[in-house]
Image: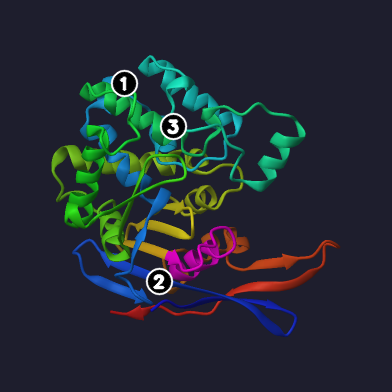
Amino acid sequence: MSETLLEVTRGELVENIHRGDIAVVGKDGKLKYYKGDPYKVTYLRSSLKPIQALNVFLSGAAEKYDFDDKEIAIMCASHYGEDLHKKVVDKILKKIGLNESNLLCRGAYSINEKFKDYQIANHIKLTPANSDCSGKHCGMLASCLAKGYSIENYNSMDNPLQQDIKKIIAGFCEVKEDKIVIGTDGCGVPVHGISLYNAALGFAKFTFTDDLEPKLKTACDRIFNAMNNYPEMVAGTGGFCTELMKHSNGKLIGKIGADGVYCLAVKGMDVGIAIKIEDGNMHRAVPPVVMRCLEELNVLTTSEMEALKRFRHEHLINSLGEDVGKVNPVFHLNEA
């Protein structure tokens, strides 16, 4: 059963509770720490993008189109649709000989509220490149072209591209392919349901790649380094994923997913972490839970924690600008 991870206080009362589940898995496949049910099966949503991006390398697309680190990073991203993101998406499309009309994701307002307000106030015309998933879609198109697959329905499970991605997730996360639950994600592509344990195991493999087959090792190393070299591509200005990687000095990658999921790969400890917030709260609940996990595991230095302190506890601010409450992590990890 899910356990209480966060309490939201307003004045003297606990007004809301966020429950969830956590799995911390080592590169050896052993469950190290947990909270709630580490074997809960859930859709990992966009937190699996770094694993899905492995196909860009295994398909031959990364080599064929000589993708740079910015381009690889945005293929793993849930970006804010800022100009810096659109430029990279446009660059990828030009490189592979396609355009925005080939993207099967619709133009959407930014997932960042501040930038969304800017888009509305300035009457910004939305295009598919604005979608937070446009980088992932570019990677899928590139892989189709490299493999000779149709690009007309690349978002369908009937397309061999999606079968390839499913096989990669199954192998990398060590789950039987027929046990992966398939749904449809917000951007129209298949979404994969696996256990938190298996997701964390997959992310643990990014931390120590020497045992992997050469092509897979190259892919994992490039993805890990690209996300750290260009963290602004992975989210955007002030975003949690961006700030977390920017201030952790190359020791981890972190990726958020809709409906309250988050996955990390942490070098040094060589563990993967997978988190699911039971009620699906993404913006308020996820960062404090991630920060508590990193604190419990002694991942970050004092100076790194200080740089990220605004994500440890969210404050409730009313319309008068007054601090009236707080979001507090109240859990401790259990040793397996």
Marking on residue 65: 1
Magenta-drawn segment? 276-294
Residue underneath mark 3: 70
In the image, residue 95 above or below residue 315: above
Question: As rendered, which of 216 and 298 lies closer to the eye?
Answer: 216
Q: In the rendered image, which quarter is residue 272 located in?
A: bottom left
In the figure, is residue 198 to the left or right of 101? Answer: left
Q: Amino acid at mark 2?
A: Asp
User: Marks 3 and 1, Cα distance to the nearest angstrom?
Assistant: 13 Å
Q: Amino acid at mark 3?
A: Lys
Q: In the rendered image, which quarter is residue 141 located in?
A: top left
What x and y, as percent, mark residue 236?
A: 56, 42
Task: Answer whether residue 293 is magenta in the image.
Answer: yes
In the image, residue 138 above or below residue 309: above
- Residue at x 67% of width, y 72% of height: 326
User: Marks 1 and 2, Cα distance to the nearest angstrom?
Assistant: 40 Å
In the figure, is residue 320 to the left or right of 281? Answer: right
Residue underneath mark 2: 21
Q: Amino acid at mark 1?
A: Tyr
Question: As rendered, which of 126 and 241 lies closer to the eye?
Answer: 126
